[in-house]
Image (cartoon, rainbow, N blue to C red):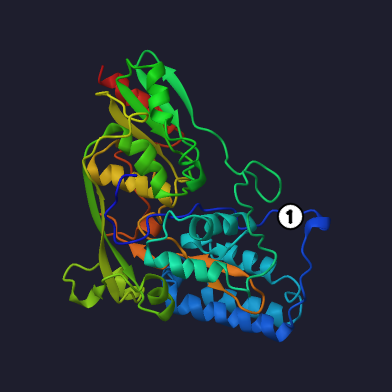
């Protein structure tokens, strides 16, 4: 596997639906009811963690979200007793009101299995110091039995559905000599399945002069997907760096304490929002893809121009791919702004010890080249679509204009 020089964990996990799929009644494990006082303790612990480690509460307030009001309102719901039997439902509703911003959500059963597969069942990231902390949380005996540990080698989700998701597809536009490769997801579990996606598509149309990667609506998954399956087949060396900012809280240091952070106050060009959000530390993230021969079954030889289609559905590691393309010139971005939050690390996991529920959120704020917050501004395209124009149509129009 191609080595990657980076100061943070490159596996930004897929933004999944906040709700968990329901199990048939016969398959649900019995859960001992949690006393109301303990539920309130979990709730206060959660908000303490958000205030200390989640960097975006001041930003949400600026955007017109009444954060303190939301906190007080849901606390009253707990006091009334209506939330004690279903804290999970209460948290989902609360996080939705907070916009689920920057991966803020309750960990679903499917997402738990994804985390578990990456940090417990697999050795892929075993040498990263962060992996040990994730393993510790995921295997904590206090984790709710509602989170089912995935069976080794299982290709199905807990609801019996195929967990691998839709396959990539390709289409050919002869007039423009353009090959479109549609990539719906960067899920880590798809890396091996889709490893020859570019080679397979080009084998059908080696005459392609343009390759268009359509990642519209791609909610992310793992950086390994695009690094290994989309970038590596073309070869070349690539280097990209950007700054991440964070709170130096106990939780952040627990997960990412090995990072060599520096005081934000020492930066002469630190964005104003770092002070507003109270981000007192920063570090330089660097992604290095060294020059080396692609795997023979993946390698492609083509001089085709590369394009990437993006929209507001592009998020997490899919946004990071867009950032990479924009910053390095690997491909021309066409479409509308992404939803961002790709220039950071894997969201941390917070265990609420009494209920056993897990909450996750991003703790790092990535800085776009223009100085904006990546999670807020997203990544801008090189060629912007005007209203109601599809990114693919805009791209094909641009290609035809150059013929």
Q: Position of residue 31 (x, y in %)?
A: 76, 71
Of the pair 291 and 205, the residue shown nearer to us: 291
Residue 289 appears in the figure: yes
Q: Which quadrant would residue 383 be assigned to in this image?
A: top left
Left or right side of 7 for 77:
right
Q: Which quadrant would residue 43 be assigned to in this image?
A: bottom right
* 33 w.r.t. 339: above or below: below
Give the residue drawn at x 39%, y 54%: 342
Residue 64 appears in the figure: no
Give the residue drawn at x 43%, y 69%: 56
Q: Position of residue 244 (x, y in %)?
A: 30, 64
Location of the N terminus by quadrant is top left
Please give the residue where the numbered disc 1 appears in the rendered image. Answer: 22
Q: What crowding class fits label 1: few (fewer than 14 Cα within 10 Å), some (14-19), or many (20 or more)?
A: few
* 154 w.r.t. 29: above or below: above
Of the pair 319 and 187, the residue shown nearer to us: 187
Location of the C terminus by quadrant is top left
Give the residue drawn at x 44%, y 32%: 390
Left or right side of 387 for 381:
left
Give the residue drawn at x 29%, y 56%: 368
Q: Which quadrant would residue 243 be assigned to in this image?
A: bottom left
């Amino acid at each position: 596997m191609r080595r990657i020089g980076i100061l943070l964990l490159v596996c930004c996990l897929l933004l999944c639906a906040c709700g968990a799929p329901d199990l048939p009644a016969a398959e649900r494990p019995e859960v001992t009811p949690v006393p109301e006082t303990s539920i309130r303790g979990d709730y206060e612990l959660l908000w303490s963690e958000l205030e200390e480690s989640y960097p975006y509460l001041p930003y949400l307030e600026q955007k017109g979200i009444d954060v303190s009001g939301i906190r007080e309102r849901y606390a009253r719901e707990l006091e009334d007793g209506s939330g004690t039997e279903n804290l999970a439902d209460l948290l989902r509703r609360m996080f939705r009101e907070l916009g689920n911003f920057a991966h803020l959500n309750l960990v679903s059963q499917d997402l738990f299995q994804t985390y578990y597969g990456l940090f417990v069942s697999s050795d892929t990231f075993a040498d990263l110091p962060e992996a040990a902390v994730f393993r510790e949380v995921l295997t904590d005996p206090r984790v709710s039995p509602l989170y089912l540990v995935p069976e080794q080698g299982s290709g199905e989700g807990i609801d019996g559905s195929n967990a691998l998701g839709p396959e990539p597809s390709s289409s050919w536009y002869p007039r423009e000599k353009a090959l479109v490769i549609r990539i719906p997801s960067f899920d880590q579990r798809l890396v091996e399945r889709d490893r020859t996606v570019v080679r397979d598509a080009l084998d059908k149309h080696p005459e392609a002069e343009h390759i268009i990667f359509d990642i519209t609506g791609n909610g992310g998954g793992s950086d390994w997907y695009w690094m290994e399956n989309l970038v590596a087949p073309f070869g070349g060396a690539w280097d990209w760096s950007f700054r991440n900012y964070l709170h130096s809280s106990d939780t952040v240091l627990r997960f990412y304490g090995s990072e060599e952070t520096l005081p934000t106050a020492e930066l002469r060009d630190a964005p104003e929002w770092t002070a507003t959000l109270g981000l007192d530390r920063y570090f330089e993230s660097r992604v290095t893809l060294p020059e080396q021969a692609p795997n023979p079954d993946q390698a492609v030889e083509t001089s085709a121009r590369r394009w990437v289609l993006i929209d507001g559905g592009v998020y997490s590691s899919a946004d990071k791919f867009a950032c990479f393309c924009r910053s390095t010139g690997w491909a021309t971005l066409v479409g509308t702004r992404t939803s961002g939050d790709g220039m950071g690390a894997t969201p941390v996991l917070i265990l609420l010890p009494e209920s056993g529920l897990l909450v996750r959120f991003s703790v790092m704020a990535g800085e776009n080249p223009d100085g904006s917050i990546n999670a807020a501004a997203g990544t801008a395209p090189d060629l912007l679509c005007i209203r109601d124009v599809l990114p693919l149509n805009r791209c094909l129009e641009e290609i035809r204009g150059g013929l």
